[in-house]
């Protein structure tokens, strides 16, 4: 007969499997026909594990209530070798549940190469300076007990598992088991069961990369990142008692109930109409015919693409009349309307497309049409996007696309196979935007907006779901942001062999709390950066 610790471990594992299963089932329902095939396989595997655990518990006299998500119910009889049914003496599973007050605050998972840092730096910070209860293997594991049971007990007996990320940790299969056990208990991340800390630069596995990571690799930010980690641990500690109901059962919100972070953005309240960059109008306009605009055909080096009015006005307010003109020229061609002026030191065409990449008036056709008429040296999409990492990014930060990845094209079989072609922005344009150390744009609360360079994902979805965003980040852990027009811009420009780049600033986090409140700020920041680059008369040299 197994001891009570083994029974309790199986009950804890059953509880975490059920939590994960509920989330998977609800995600599958939410996605409907768009749910990938692998999701059903994961559900089937989880239900099979649950059946095995329940059978084990029943054989040892512990009856567990059958839940709908468990799948097909197993028989409640235990058969002996002779085939005769043997009654059990069931014990209520609730009698063996851990009391939340008995939980440690954190279990530390690390590679032996980092034991000295854990012992000399991390543990004193956790226990002596912050009064947290930690579990660490060399001090707290029971001698003589199988290591897998010690690890299971430590993970299940702690509110959080802290992972010390290094390349050695990533390559260790044993540490991967510890991470999987912790993430199973909280796959969506809402309970902060798994807290990754990057001690040395490495490439985390996708399940970890989708989460915010405390990055200690920059000595100048290490203290700040450690304090952020302590705040997260203390929040988990304060939530411990709230995660159980009156009956002592752990309650986990379903995906439909997952609220966005209480701090929906990092800005205090401000009056947008009083900001120096807020102008919801264009400079004076003059309508001209196509014949009157003909002198500028082929003489407009820059094409600027916007989508909504916030983007359009943010760019338009910086547009100046062409040489020898007193007003911005407005000319209609086919289904499109263009505005001709001077942006920085360059003759520029500004237009506003429909949202998305595909469809009448959307970015792909609009870009092709404009490039055919104006023959620009550079096509730049300017506007707003959602951010990926609120711990490293802030509202108003500008994203510079090194490449665009279309995330919609996939092959959905037993596993997802990415079919979208990665398209790199023009190397010369990327270089110009990368070297903008003298650019300044201040947010309403004072801090300067920052630049982030890298991969931007693009699709036809207006993403506003923490679960959907987490799925995308798991597929593309390198992504710094997402939007809807980059696929059309990159595809049209690639087809016509014209240099392009996408410059968009963060206006929200696509976490279920999407709103347009910060779009004017984000659009203004992106427009300001583009204007700064194009103010250099040599910016388009050799492009």
Image (cartoon, rainbow, N blue to C red):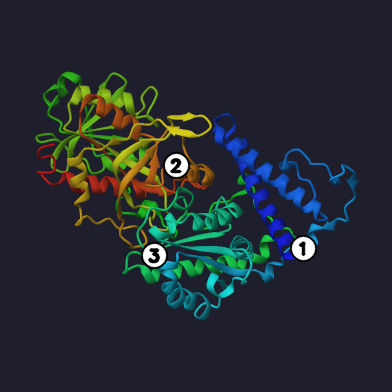
Of the numbered discs 2 and 1, the one sitting upstream in the chain is 1
Q: What residue is drawn where x is 68% and y is 71%? A: 102
Q: Mark number for residue 96?
A: 1
Residue that carries the numbered disc 3 in the rendered image: 199
Position of the C terminus, as image quadrant, is: top left
In the displayed structure image, the side of residue 252 where residue 408 appears, left or right: left
Label 1 packing within 10 angstroms: few (<14), some (14-19), many (20+): some
Residue 181 position (above or below residue 335): below
**Mark 3 or mark 2, whichever is nearer to me:** 3
In the displayed structure image, the side of residue 76 where residue 492 appears, left or right: left
Instruction: Give x and y (percent) for residue 302.
Output: 18, 35
Front one among 132 and 376: 132
Q: Secondary structure at mark 2?
A: helix
Tell me the quarter of the picture where residue 459 sits.
top left
Q: Mark number for residue 362?
A: none
Disc 2 from disc 1: Cα separation: 39 Å
Of the numbered discs 3 and 2, the one sitting upstream in the chain is 3
Tally of numbered tags = 3
Q: Secondary structure at mark 3?
A: loop
Front one among 283 and 296: 296
Residue that carries the numbered disc 2 in the rendered image: 475
Label 3 packing within 10 angstroms: few (<14), some (14-19), many (20+): some
Instruction: Work out which residue is located at the far bottom of the displayed protein and give it.
Output: 128
Of the numbered discs 1 and 3, the one sitting upstream in the chain is 1
Label 2 packing within 10 angstroms: few (<14), some (14-19), many (20+): some
């Amino acid at each position: 007969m197994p001891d009570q610790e083994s029974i309790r471990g199986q009950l804890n594992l059953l509880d975490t499997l059920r939590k994960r299963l509920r989330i998977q089932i609800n995600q599958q329902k939410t996605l409907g026909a768009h749910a990938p095939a692998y999701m059903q396989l994961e559900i089937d595997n989880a239900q099979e594990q649950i059946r095995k655990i329940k059978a084990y518990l029943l054989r040892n006299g512990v009856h567990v209530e059958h839940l709908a998500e468990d799948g097909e119910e197993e028989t409640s009889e235990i058969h002996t070798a002779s085939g005769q049914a043997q009654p059990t003496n069931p014990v209520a599973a609730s009698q063996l549940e851990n009391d939340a007050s008995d939980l440690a605050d954190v279990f530390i998972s690390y590679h032996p190469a980092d034991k000295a840092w854990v012992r000399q730096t991390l543990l004193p910070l956790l226990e002596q300076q912050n009064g947290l209860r930690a579990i660490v293997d060399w001090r707290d594991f029971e001698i003589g007990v199988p290591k897998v049971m010690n690890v299971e007990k430590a993970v299940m007996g702690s509110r959080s598992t802290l992972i010390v990320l290094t390349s050695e940790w990533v390559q260790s299969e044993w540490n991967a088991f510890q991470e999987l056990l912790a993430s199973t208990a909280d796959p969506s991340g809402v309970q902060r069961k798994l807290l990754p800390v990057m001690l040395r630069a490495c490439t985390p596995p996708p399940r970890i990369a989708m989460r915010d990571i405390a990055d200690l690799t920059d000595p100048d930010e290490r203290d700040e990142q450690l304090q952020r980690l302590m705040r997260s641990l203390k929040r988990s500690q304060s939530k411990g008692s709230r995660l159980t109901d009156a009956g002592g059962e752990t309650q986990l919100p379903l995906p439909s109930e997952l609220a966005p972070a209480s701090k929906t953005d990092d800005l205090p309240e401000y009056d947008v109409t009083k900001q120096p960059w807020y102008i919801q109008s264009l400079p004076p306009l003059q309508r001209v015919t196509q014949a009157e605009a003909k002198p500028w055909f082929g003489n407009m080096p820059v094409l600027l693409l916007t989508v909504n009015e916030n983007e359009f006005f943010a760019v338009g307010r910086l547009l100046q009349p062409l040489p020898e003109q007193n007003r911005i020229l407005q000319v209609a061609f086919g289904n499109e309307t263009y505005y001709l002026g001077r942006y920085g030191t360059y003759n520029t065409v500004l237009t506003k497309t429909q949202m998305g990449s595909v469809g009448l008036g959307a970015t792909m056709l609009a870009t092709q049409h404009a490039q055919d008429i104006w023959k620009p040296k550079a096509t730049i999409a300017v506007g707003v996007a959602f951010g990926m990492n609120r711990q490293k990014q802030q509202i108003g930060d500008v994203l510079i696309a090194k490449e665009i990845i279309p995330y919609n094209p996939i092959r959905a079989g037993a596993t997802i196979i990415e079919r979208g072609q990665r398209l790199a922005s023009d190397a010369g344009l990327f270089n110009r935007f990368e070297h903008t150390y003298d650019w300044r744009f201040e947010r309403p609360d004072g801090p300067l907006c920052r630049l982030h360079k890298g991969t931007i994902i693009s699709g036809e979805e207006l993403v506003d779901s923490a679960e959907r965003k987490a799925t995308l980040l798991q597929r593309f852990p390198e992504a710094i942001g997402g939007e809807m027009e980059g696929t059309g811009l990159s595809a049209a420009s690639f087809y016509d062999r014209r240099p392009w780049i996408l410059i968009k600033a963060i206006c929200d986090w696509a976490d279920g709390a999407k709103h347009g409140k910060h779009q004017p700020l984000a659009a203004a920041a992106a427009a300001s950066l583009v204007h700064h680059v194009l103010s250099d008369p040599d910016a388009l040299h050799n492009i």
